[in-house]
Image (spheres, grey):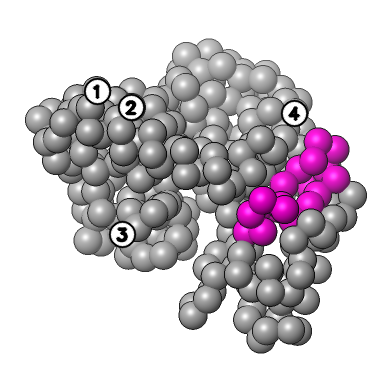
Amino acid sequence: MKLSEEHTSQPMGANMINISELTELCGKLGCKITPECPLSEYVTFRFGGKCRALISVNSASSAAELMKYLSVNNVKYGILGRGSNVLVPDEGFDGVILLFGGDFAQISVDGETMRCEAGTLLAAACVRAQQEGLSGMENLFGIPGTVGGGLFMNAGAYGSEMKDIVVSAEYIDENFEIKTINAEDMDLSYRHSIFSETKQVITSVEMKLNKGSSDDIKTAMNECMNKRSSKQPLEYPSAGSTFKRPEGSYASLLIDQCGLKGMTVGGAMVSEKHSGFVINKGYATCADVIELCEKVKNIVQEKTGYVLELEPVILK
């Protein structure tokens, strides 16, 4: 999942963290905990401060138990997946991060149905589908997020979206119980799902694909990746598309029209390769990116009347 890819909770009187007690609980659950963990290596923008502790979640039941413990003990927490749609402040996150990553990334296939735990990389799911001769995920190949994060924001590219293939999802509700929801009840639309409006946390996703030729699927995936490489600044850290598509236009078109390609603040720059991307030239801070995005939004609104909305979530 991306913090969208992600949820945070901050009850009253938060952040009185008993690390020893939390470490003991993680030991019982088989989850790795890293106190005072720098988050820059867990987000694709490659900047941001530390969290009080990072826990690598290994199952839905472990996630539910940890969320319940943190909530009961008034500890602020966030859910992080690949971190490909997240801005981590330079001062860090004054709470606990539950990481849905490699320890929570099992894939199972039954006929034309694929089930992925939330921490599964979308790229890994696409490759597994190709190996199984299952079509439907080709255009999602190269999106640098997790399956859980992809559903959270209804990720998509080149005319395909998660909503085209999702059948159901398992999630943890506000009472820390594990439930199932069908796709038609997820309110899936452009970069939106019901999960982005609630504290429900996705733990697995079930997708219905179609039988196809593994070779043809692999060719389509390669073509998709070649498109991305030729048009997007993949050589620089970023959070992908920085602004949502405004109704009636495209963010990159508006930014181009305003002559903002190459605009910089500190180490952050509007990509000269694709103006829909704000990139980290190697020394950007979160403050640099936020300031640059605000300048872009203000200029675009002043010159075109369109109001751009930031796509990445700021971890708070």
Q: Quadrant of residue 236?
A: top right
Q: Earlier in the sequence, mark 2 or mark 3?
A: 2
Q: Earlier in the sequence, mark 4 or mark 3?
A: 4
The numbered disc on residue 131 is 1
The numbered disc on residue 162 is none
Secondary structure found at label 1:
helix
For disc 4, the neighbor class at 10 Å (few under 14, some 14 to 19, many from 20) is: some
Spot occupied by residue 65 in the image (x, y as percentages of width and height): 44, 32
Secondary structure found at label 3:
loop
The numbered disc on residue 38 is 4
- Specify start and end residues of the magenta stretch as a single range: 267-286
Spot occupied by residue 71 in the image (x, y as percentages of width and height): 55, 43
Picture residue at 22% right of the left edge, 61% below the top:
184
Q: Which residue is mark 2?
A: 127
Q: Earlier in the sequence, mark 1 or mark 4?
A: 4
In the figure, 220 relative to 246: above or below?
Answer: above
Q: Amino acid at mark 1?
A: Gln
Relative to 26, 161 lies left or right: left
Q: Amino acid at mark 2?
A: Val
In the figure, 240 relative to 110: above or below?
Answer: below
Measure the C-alpha gap from mark 2 to mark 1.
6 Å
Q: Which residue is mark 3?
A: 186
Measure the C-alpha gap from mark 2 to mark 3.
26 Å
